[in-house]
Structures are given as C-alpha cells and as structure tokens.
Image: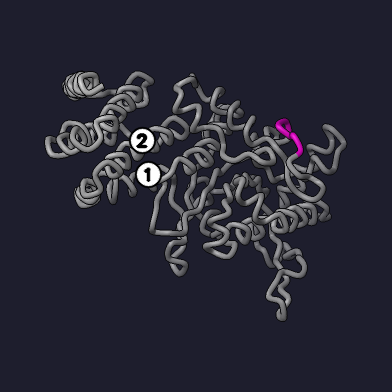
Amino acid sequence: MADSLLNRYLDETGEYPTSVGLSVWGTSAMRTSGDDIAEVLALIGVRPVWDEASRRVSSLTVVPLAELGRPRVDVTVRISGFFRDAFPHVIAMMDDAIAMVAALDEPAEQNYLKANADADLALHGDTRRATTRIFGSKPGSYGAGILQAIESGSWRDDADLAEVYTAWGGFAYGRDLNGTPAADDMRANYKRIKVAAKNVNSAEHDIADSDDYFQYHGGMVATVRALTGSDPRAYVGDSTSPDNVRTRTLAEETARVFRARVVNPRWIGAMRRHGYKGAFELAATVDYLFGFDATAGVVHDWMYESLAKEYVIDEENQAFLRQSNPWALRGIVERLHEAAERGLWAEPDPEVLAEMQRIYLDVEGDLEEDA
C-alpha cells in the first residue's frame, strides 16, 4: 500500500512526497490486522520484528536506506477515538518507530522525517514535540467535529472547517502523551502534508456510506488547504482485494462510488424496499457527498444534477419519498439548494432548480397539513 501510494505520487509529480497524512481507524485495524500501521512503518522505513511464539511484535528495526531504495517519508497520523481506546500499545509502537527514524544519522534529502523534526527542534528546542506525529480527539471524546459544522451550516470557508478540525483533533498521543493539547504542533505537521490519505478495505461500504469519511479525510484536506493555500493530493488506498492493491485519487473514488452505487437504479430500488429507512439512506448519501465536496471539492456539477433528477425529480423515486419519508425528500432538496447557494454546484440548470423548488413547496405544504 505504501509503494502504491508513493508510485502514484511519483507518476504525477516526478518526486516523492515529503510528508503523508493518514487517517487511521480502529475498525479498519481490526478488520485487516493492522494494514494502516504497516503502511506507516513502511513509509518511514521501519520493519516490525515478530516473536514467533507469541505472534506479537517484539521490537522494531530500521530498514537501511540502501535496501529501502528511496527517501524515508514523514507521516502524520490522525487516529480515531476508537483506535485510541483499543490500541494504546500500537500508538506507542508507532511513536517509537518515529523516534527511531528521527534519531538516525542520515542526510536530510534521504530522511524527510528527520529533516522536519530537526527544523522544529531548531524552532522550539523540544525533542518530544519535534517527534510528535500522532494526533486525535481529546481523551473521552470522538469524531472530527466537521459533521456538526456541516449540519449546522455555520461554516463559511476552509478556515472555519480547519479551526473545527484542529480544535477537535489537536491532541497528541504517544509515549508519555495521553491526549496532550498540541494544536500548534498539529498545524506545523499539517502544513507539510503533500498527500492526505485514507484506506478502504471492505466492499461492504464506501466513502459515501458514512460521515466519518468526509470528516476525517475531507477534514484533513480542508485543513491542509487552509494552512498552506493549496490542495494536497487526496488519495484513497484500496485493499478490498489484498492481491490487487491500488491507489485512486479521492476524485476518482468519488466518481467510482457515484456511478457504481449512488445513482445505480438497482441500489435505489433496493432502498425503496426498505421504506422509511431506505429513504433516510438516500438523504444521508446526499449529505455525505455534500460534506466531501465542502471539504475536498470532489463532487462535480453533473453529479449534483444527477442527484436532483434521480432522487427528487424522478416520478417513481419522488412518489416513494413522499409516501415513506417526506422529511428525507425535503432534506435532499435543502442540501442540493445549499450546494448551489455556496457555489459548490457551480452552474445548476435553472429549470432543475425551479422544479426542485416546486417539489419542495409541495412537500412543505403536505408536512404542515399533517402537523
């Protein structure tokens, strides 16, 4: 997975990324037995040593540069609250690996982690801060905060989203770090991120199935953009088929999921068989795509128009939503209108907007009569 990510970046830019940001979740760690952790170690050039009797990692060893064949890439990890709670020993192991690489006597152009740590050390003189690379929510709290901002509509721009993302995730973890407030260190590391990555490892769900994807991955993209003024490369590592690992851009993954599921008549038909909950899933999918567009800018105008036509204007789907869950229909129209108002849906068809508005007023009237 590390090689796939690096090769994709190398093909696109002609060089290796100096720093990668990776979102790591506990459920994924359980499902894959630690693919994300292995990728972190591979990127920085550290190999776990396994105890054959216990089948546990007993120690870590540095992969020599000659064997690695490339520079050591710096990695900043954004862990979920569940990962923090379930795998404190893995957090300590990653932190140890980072400290090992930062202490190596290697040239800066071959060890980006050390180069960055040395630069931070020169600024504030604190070795512990200079080697902090693992950030997460405050102890006892969960999530990335982006969902609340998106749902409330209180955000204005990337700076607002970055402020929320940092306030929720600016706590450091590692040896002797159990959620220490570290917003400044988080920002220092995020400013360096060239690739914002999230891995998927199950075909049972996708990036438009849960708000966590746009909160963690999209939130990272928006934060880097707010701090640096430019977008990082946003990649999705796909190991759903472990023998055929591949890296897609987030835009490619969004388009793939959109065509394969979101506007797939078979999936929409399946949701209709689930009544109220199926209608909720349609509305939630629109919300999650909107969240990804707000944070990472990956939803194109044709996608918004397809959602409007398939979910709202289509007579069969509209009738289903009106009968099973009119609140979902109202929510879909409101979200699509917000996308247009915010310029995310840059050039909507006026006739499509007018038809959605007509349907919205009809549904609103029906709901008032039933109240």
Q: Residue furthest bottom?
A: 53
Left or right, 137 with respect to 261, comes to: right
User: Badge 2 is on which residue?
Assistant: 299
Residue 73 lies, in percent from the top left, at 66, 51
The residue that appears at 64% across and 36% down in the rendered structure is: 169
Circle number at residue 254: 1
Kindly indicate whether the residue at mark 2 contacts the one at mark 1 (C-beta within 8 angstroms): yes
Residue 240 sits in which quadrant?
Answer: bottom left
Which element carries disc 2, helix, strand or loop? loop
Q: Position of residue 251 (x, y in %)?
A: 40, 42
**For residue 63, above or below residue 283:** below
- Left-right relation of 170 to 291: right
Q: Could you say which is closer to the camera, residue 308 or residue 320?
A: 320
Residue 103 drawn at (x, y percent): 83, 53
Q: CA distance from mark 1 to mark 2?
A: 7 Å
- Is residue 20 in view? no
Q: Residues within 10 Å of mark 2 (few under 14, many from 20)?
A: many
**110 part of magenta stretch:** no
**Of the numbered discs in the image, which one, if any, rests on residue 28?**
none
Tell me which label, 1 or 2, sits earlier in the chain.
Answer: 1
SS at badge 1: helix
Q: Which residues are magenta?
A: 180-184
Residue drawn at (69%, 54%), measured in percent from left and top?
72
The outermost residue toward the right is 125
Task: Please name the amino acid that badge 1 sits on.
Answer: Thr
Toward which corner of the image does residue 250 lie, by quadrant?
top left
Q: Is residue 183 magenta?
A: yes
Residue 38 image position (x, y, % from top left): 62, 61
